[in-house]
Image (spheres, rainbow, N blue to C red):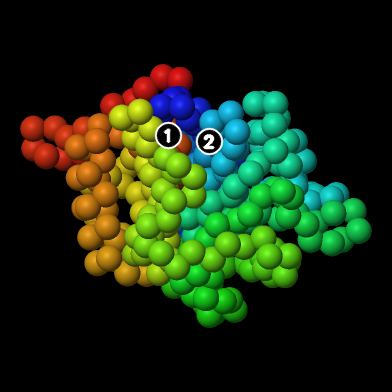
Amino acid sequence: MKVGRFEIEQLSEGIFEVFDDGIFQKIDSADITARQQKPGIKKQSSAIGINPILIRDGKHNVLLDTGLGWGLDHKSSYTDTSNLLTNLDIFGLAPSDITHVVLSHLHFDHAAGSTYVDSNTSTQPTMSYANYFIQKKEWYYALEQVGKKKQISGAGYELDEFYKLAAEDKLVMITDTYFELLPGIELIRTGGHTPGHQIVKIQDSGETAYFLGDLVPSEHHLNHYAMRHMDVDPIQSKKAKTLILRQAVKEKSLMLFYHSVHAKAGMLEQDKDKKFILREING
């Protein structure tokens, strides 16, 4: 996918079943179909994708969220699995080629791939030459939540690995609502899902794309403004979604979804009833 000078690629760690207790289990599309066809089974889980984003402009390689990171650790029990290494290799890149990492927030399903444990059992940055850009408000909120019972289904903070990034000055703490990462790439703090949640706007040559993190996790959430079981502040989520989606329609924007299983990207439009719809694209 192209947005002006930017090449945008959706990476994928696969499809996962997320249980009410926050456990993730990798599944495939056949598993999803089989579960849907079993009558009378109480729904205790949901299927989601894990889809980080790679942005390239010839000079910079920017990664948006880092996934679960299964299989990155030395002697990991997760073998033959999709992760940042395998995904970047498809495009002829290694983690050391990444110049910037943006984390929408620090829930482990978005951020756990930021580090790995090496053969000496030491924690190392997965993207060794990149800085990691997060909202300062998110960092301090995450520190407060460590060890607390999860209030949001399937969400949690596991920050042990991030202390290494902080100690090595790899974390860039953003305090502005709007922050220019690079010309044409802007980070926007929305709050809502978490206090320091941020999205990414990509714009060049009259074309626009949005990476929405967990503000709008998938195409199925486009017309669901309040997700009380997911958002720390549902009212703020609703406000932010309303503003962003209306603006995105005006800009005829490409939407990029982190948790979609099927329609991972598409052009945002509205139907005659003013409902948001997604026109899927190829490439």
At 8% from the left edge and 37% from the top edge, which residue is drawn? 273
Give the camera-side residue of 16 and 177: 177
Q: Can you give x and y, in whole percent of width and height, for residue 144 in the image?
A: 53, 80
Q: Earlier in the sequence, mark 1 or mark 2?
A: 2
Residue 120 visible, this orientation: yes
Residue identified by numbered label 1: 264
Give the foreground label among 1 and 2: 2
Q: Can you give x and y, in whole percent of width and height, for residue 231 in the image?
A: 36, 64
Label 2 secondary element: strand
Sort mark 1 into few (<14), some (14-19) or many (20+) by Cα contacts within 10 Å: some
At 24% from the left edge and 67% from the top edge, which residue is drawn? 235
Give the camera-side residue of 269 and 127: 127
Q: Can you give x and y, in whole percent of width and height, for residue 222 in the image?
A: 27, 44
Where 95 sits versus 118, above or below? above
Label 1 secondary element: loop
Residue identified by numbered label 2: 55
Q: Which labelled disc corresponds to residue 177?
A: none
